[in-house]
Image (cartoon, rainbow, N blue to C red):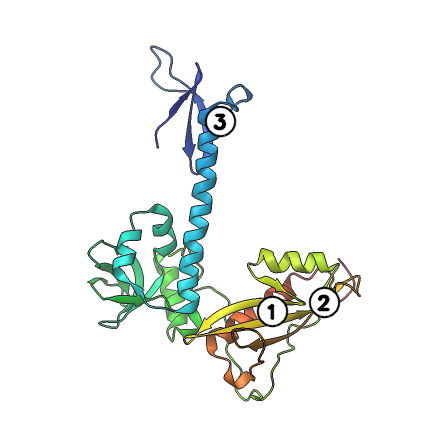
């Protein structure tokens, strides 16, 4: 985006997502002034307000793109390659998609996505370090708990200097322990995290992208084609001054029928444990009473 005239002296532009101003070149000068935040004398100019609104829209758009790609990854749903090609020219979509690990339905290649074109063609760096061009009908962006070569992919990504726009390879994962009581319906590993108030706990929940439903923190997860609700209990906000987290459990889509642990799939297990661990890590009262 170029520079726009703002008043008699300044011009403004978006630079790395921020509105910046500079003095225009005077006759005989070879370059404009240095870039600064818009000075007070032009802050109310329509050009500045329009750029600020545009910057805010771009920020929201980038967040929405990343959230959608994250949703595809967590659910491991097939995504048409033609759709990726149509989205790729948009910088926000490209930043979210670039270097996401994809698995092609045909011929079964796993690698880092580097390009997508409107004809449905993809350019992928495979695990041998080779750049291959493919034209599969769909690809999946697997949840990391479903990637059998996760450690190899992490090592290879470090060698390539890969920085993913959506957390996939380095997303915290949990695997269901061997020998777990499959008939039990809750996990207590992260229960008992204490917060100064229910407000602090609920704020932590929403800041992490989860929802508060009744007296629980909840996350709806698509695992193996079925929606599962993971929930972490909370103390009663009407009877307690402080707040605590309770046990973690999983239920059906509506959140009414509790699932035995033996029926909880790998993605739902990992994502539920991730939520419980994050709430435990954010506690505002530690075991020695410090806040």
Q: Position of residue 240 (x, y in %)?
A: 79, 65
| Residue 202 seen | yes
User: Which mark is in front, 1 or 3?
Assistant: 1
Are discs 1 and 3 less than 8 Å apart at CB?
no
State the separation of the CA atoms marked 2 and 1. Answer: 12 Å
First in residue order: circle 1 vs circle 3: 3
Q: Bin the neighbour count of mark 3 within 10 Å (Cα to Cα): few under 14, some 14-19, many 20 and up.
A: few
In the rendered structure, the answer to whether residue 109 lies left or right of residue 230 reads left
Q: Which mark is residue 170?
A: none
Relative placement, left or right, of 189 versus 74 is right
Residue 288, percent from left and from top: 78, 65
**Lower position in the chain sequence, tag 2 or tag 3:** 3
The residue that disc 1 covers is 276
User: Relative to 51, is 71 above or below?
Assistant: below
One can see residue 34 in this view: no
Res. 96 image quadrant: bottom left
- Which residue position is annotated with label 2? 244
Circle 3 sits on which residue? 36
Residue at image x 44%, y 26%?
A: 47
Q: Secondary structure at mark 2?
A: strand
Q: Residue at x 31, y 52 (%)?
A: 87
The quarter of the image holding the N terminus is top left
**Residue 32 location (% of width, % of height):** 39, 20
In the figure, 246 relative to 2: above or below? below
Between 254 and 134, the one nearer to me in the picture: 254
């Amino acid at each position: 985006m170029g520079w726009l005239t703002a008043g008699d002296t300044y011009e403004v532009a978006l630079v790395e997502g921020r509105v910046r101003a500079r003095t225009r070149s005077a006759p005989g000068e070879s370059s404009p002034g240095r870039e600064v935040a818009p000075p007070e004398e032009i802050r109310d100019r329509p050009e500045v307000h329009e750029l600020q609104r545009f910057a805010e829209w771009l920020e929201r758009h980038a967040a929405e793109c990343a959230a959608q790609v994250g949703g595809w990854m967590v659910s491991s749903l097939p995504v048409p390659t033609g759709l990726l090609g149509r989205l790729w020219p948009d910088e926000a979509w490209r930043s979210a998609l670039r270097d996401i690990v994809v698995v092609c339905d045909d011929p079964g290649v796993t690698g880092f996505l580097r390009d997508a074109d409107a004809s449905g063609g993809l350019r992928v760096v495979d695990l041998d370090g080779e750049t291959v061009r493919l034209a599969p009908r769909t690809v999946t962006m697997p949840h990391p708990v479903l990637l059998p070569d996760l450690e190899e992919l992490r090592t290879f990504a470090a060698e390539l200097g890969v920085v993913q726009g959506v957390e996939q390879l380095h997303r915290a994962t949990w695997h269901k322990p061997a020998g777990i009581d499959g008939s039990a319906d809750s996990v207590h590993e992260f229960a008992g995290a204490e917060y100064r108030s229910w407000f602090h706990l609920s704020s932590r929940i929403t800041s992490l992208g989860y929802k508060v439903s009744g007296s629980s923190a909840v996350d709806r997860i698509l695992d193996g084609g079925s929606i599962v609700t993971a929930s972490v209990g909370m103390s009663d906000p009407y009877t307690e001054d402080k707040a605590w987290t309770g046990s973690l459990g999983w239920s059906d889509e509506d959140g009414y029928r509790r699932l035995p642990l033996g029926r909880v799939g790998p993605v739902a297990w990992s994502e539920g444990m991730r939520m419980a661990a994050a709430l435990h890590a954010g506690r505002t009262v530690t075991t020695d009473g410090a806040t």
